[in-house]
Amino acid sequence: MNKEKSQLQLLVFCALAIGVNVVLGSVVTYTHVPLLFLDAIGTIFIAVNFPLRYGLLTGLGTNVVLAVIHGPLALPFGLVSLTIALVAHLASRRGFGYKQAILTGIFIVFFGSFVSAAVRLVLYDGFNGTTRTLTDALVFTMRAGGLSRYFSAYTGAFSDGIIDKILSCLLVSWLSESQTVRHLFSNLRVSR
């Protein structure tokens, strides 16, 4: 009974993390803040602090909700969210202090950009999406210079994500170290 209660509480935290991803991601998108998304903080937080399956569930759930709100083109980026959860979970096995958070952010953007570039190529010919961004000019310039479509899309995805993912990981590290958050999760008995 106690284990079931802990799992139910954890699923509620996953739902809250999905809400945080959707709200922060939507606010940042609609305010057109360059090179910032904040749409993966909840996924990273759950993946770092709890078993991997909950991080994967949070990442995929975020993209399902985004697809309902913003349209079905958000669904394929669920693969990127799964990559983010996997990398964050694996990178946090030795702790998640600020130094590790910065490294994790770099790993997330390095590996996640491979997946993001493939999705961008299929959906948007390698560009960012429906709205033009600073990195689209970079992608266009690289392609005009004769570089491959995939390399250009990867560079665009990497450039888009590097600041966002490092900042997101630093925020998650700070939240994870917070006494209030630690107290909130202290009665959850789920092994990592």
Image: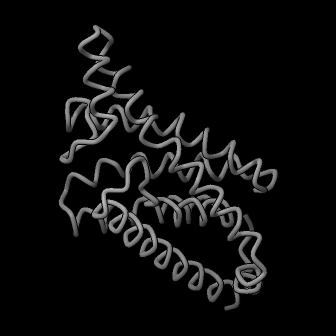
Q: As displayed, is residue 6 above or below residue 46? A: below
Residue furthest toward the top? 146
Q: Could you say which is closer to the camera, residue 19 or residue 145?
A: 145
Q: Residue at x 21, y 51 (%)?
A: 73
Q: Residue at x 73, y 64 (%)?
A: 192
- Where does the image place residue 8, in percent across and percent down from the top left? 56, 84
- Where does the image place residue 104, in percent across and percent down from the top left? 66, 45
Q: Residue at x 70, y 80 (%)?
A: 181
- Where does the image place residue 77, in percent across and percent down from the top left? 34, 48
Q: As displayed, is residue 112 above or below residue 33? A: above
Q: Residue at x 38, y 63 (%)?
A: 25
Q: Could you say which is closer to the camera, residue 107 or residue 82?
A: 107
Q: Could you say which is closer to the camera, residue 64 or residue 22?
A: 22
Location of residue 175 by image quarter: bottom right
Q: Could you say which is closer to the camera, residue 84 or residue 9?
A: 84
Q: On the picture, is 132 further left or further right than 10? A: left
Q: As displayed, is residue 177 above or below residue 155? A: below
Give the colouring mode of the picture: one colour
Q: On the picture, is 162 further left or further right than 103? A: left
Quadrant, the N terminus: bottom right
Location of residue 74 by image quarter: bottom left
- Where does the image place residue 134, in percent across and percent down from the top left? 32, 38
